[in-house]
Image (cartoon, grey):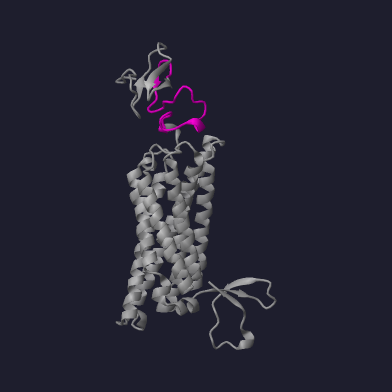
């Protein structure tokens, strides 16, 4: 208690002060309202609330301290709305390329991720006037946390096509193994993050259970970081082998198509790096919970979450795989769900070549 000053008006947000040993039961004229005060002892930093408030559902930023809200700051509506507009524009561009180039799996993943980004930032806009409502906070935390999982899924699906173009003999894993392995890792990360986000912001649960939800989100994000690091390592090895393979004409060709495809590969590499940076930030951010210092630094969030995802989706949108690999190559080098003879099941298989006898061909649904 040494060094604490007696509480005086007006109270300062986040500055603790010393109560007046029972002489004052409440302080008045703080934003024109009566403010409940502890009788003696230390007045906790920022924990003021209007005396006529009986539940946080009645709170506004003028009636209650932000310490009772899900965030310790009010999100900037303008910057969050701008990000929502940018992601919405990218969604329309991705939808256009989906219809034009028929890159079904990649475009579906990108559109899902971009929709989540739009919903997440719109929820942050709504939070400006609803700081004490759990619904918009829960929407933004879940949507913005899991959206990049869909972007990495699109990248994983694209790598399988790139490997087929440059030569699967240079890859440590088959294209099919890459797709299945990293799509499964994406699914695990998605489940962990979604479940953790749903648990962490349920006010009816005990603090220990809610903290467990945060830890589950951190586990999902950490798993995503590990998956991306392994993926980038395998990709680096593959392209190192391609570069040193003199028979890999696709890489060593000097025509414009080969140069453009290299540019596409570099763009996707940068997009993956930006997603990695963002995911590492989110692990550090949530490691100390929703009320940790980093989780309540708006500028850092806008740069390392919003900024990194804008950069990543810019490269993924400006360099669509259907444009650089070509619609037919995307279709022919991908994987397809194969329908068996009696039409009762689907399995993931490499498409048969055009030389396959008609009697052996099966109905396929391209991805």
| Residue that protrudes farthest toward the front in the picture | 32
Measuring from the top left, give residue 263's x and y in whole percent: 32, 72
Tell me where the magenta segment starts and ends, as one range: 37-66
Name the quarter where the N terminus is drawn: top left
Measuring from the top left, give residue 268's x and y in whole percent: 37, 66
Give the residue drawn at x 64%, y 87%: 359
Q: Nearer the viewer, residue 138 or 81?
A: 81
Does the segment drawn in magenta span residue 39? Answer: yes
Please say whether residue 15 is visible from this viewpoint.
Answer: yes
Q: From the viewer's perspective, is residue 227 above or below residue 176? A: above
Give the residue drawn at x 46%, y 63%: 110
| Residue that protrudes farthest toward the top in the picture | 23
Does the segment drawn in magenta span residue 253? Answer: no
Measuring from the top left, give residue 71's x and y in whole percent: 42, 38
Q: From the viewer's perspective, is residue 185 above or below residue 243? A: above
Q: Nearer the viewer, residue 33 or 292?
A: 33
């Amino acid at each position: 208690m040494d060094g604490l000053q007696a509480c005086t008006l007006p109270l300062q947000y986040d500055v603790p002060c010393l109560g007046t040993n029972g002489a004052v039961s409440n302080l008045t004229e703080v934003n024109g309202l009566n403010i409940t005060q502890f009788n003696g002892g230390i007045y906790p930093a920022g924990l003021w609330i209007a005396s006529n408030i009986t539940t946080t559902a009645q709170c506004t930023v003028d009636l209650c301290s932000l310490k009772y809200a899900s965030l310790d700051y009010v999100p900037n509506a303008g910057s969050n709305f701008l990000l929502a507009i940018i992601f919405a524009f990218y969604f329309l561009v991705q939808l256009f390329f989906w219809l034009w180039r028929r890159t079904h799996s990649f475009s579906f993943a990108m559109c899902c991720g971009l929709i989540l980004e739009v919903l997440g930032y719109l929820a942050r806009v709504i939070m400006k006037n609803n700081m004490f409502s759990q619904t918009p906070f829960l929407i933004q935390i879940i949507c913005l946390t899991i959206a990049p999982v869909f972007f990495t899924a699109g990248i994983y699906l694209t790598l399988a096509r790139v490997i087929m173009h440059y030569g699967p003999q240079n890859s440590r894993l088959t294209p099919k193994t890459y797709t299945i392995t990293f799509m499964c890792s994406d699914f695990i990360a998605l489940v962990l993050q979604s479940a953790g986000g749903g648990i962490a912001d349920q006010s009816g649960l005990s603090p220990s259970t809610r903290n467990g939800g945060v830890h589950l989100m951190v586990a999902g994000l950490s798993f995503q970081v590990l998956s991306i690091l392994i993926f980038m390592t395998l990709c680096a090895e593959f392209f190192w082998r391609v570069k040193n393979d003199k028979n890999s004409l696709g890489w060593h060709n000097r025509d414009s198509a080969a140069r453009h495809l290299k540019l596409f590969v570099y763009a996707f590499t940068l997009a993956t790096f930006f997603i990695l940076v963002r995911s590492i930030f989110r692990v550090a951010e949530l490691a100390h919970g929703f009320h940790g210092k980093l989780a309540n630094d708006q500028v850092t969030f806008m740069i390392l979450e919003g900024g990194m995802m804008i950069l990543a989706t810019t490269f993924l949108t400006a360099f669509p795989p259907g444009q650089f690999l070509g619609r037919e190559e995307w279709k022919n080098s991908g994987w397809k769900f194969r329908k068996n003879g009696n039409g009762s099941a689907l399995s993931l298989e490499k498409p048969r070549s055009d030389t396959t006898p008609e009697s052996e061909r099966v109905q396929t649904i391209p991805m």
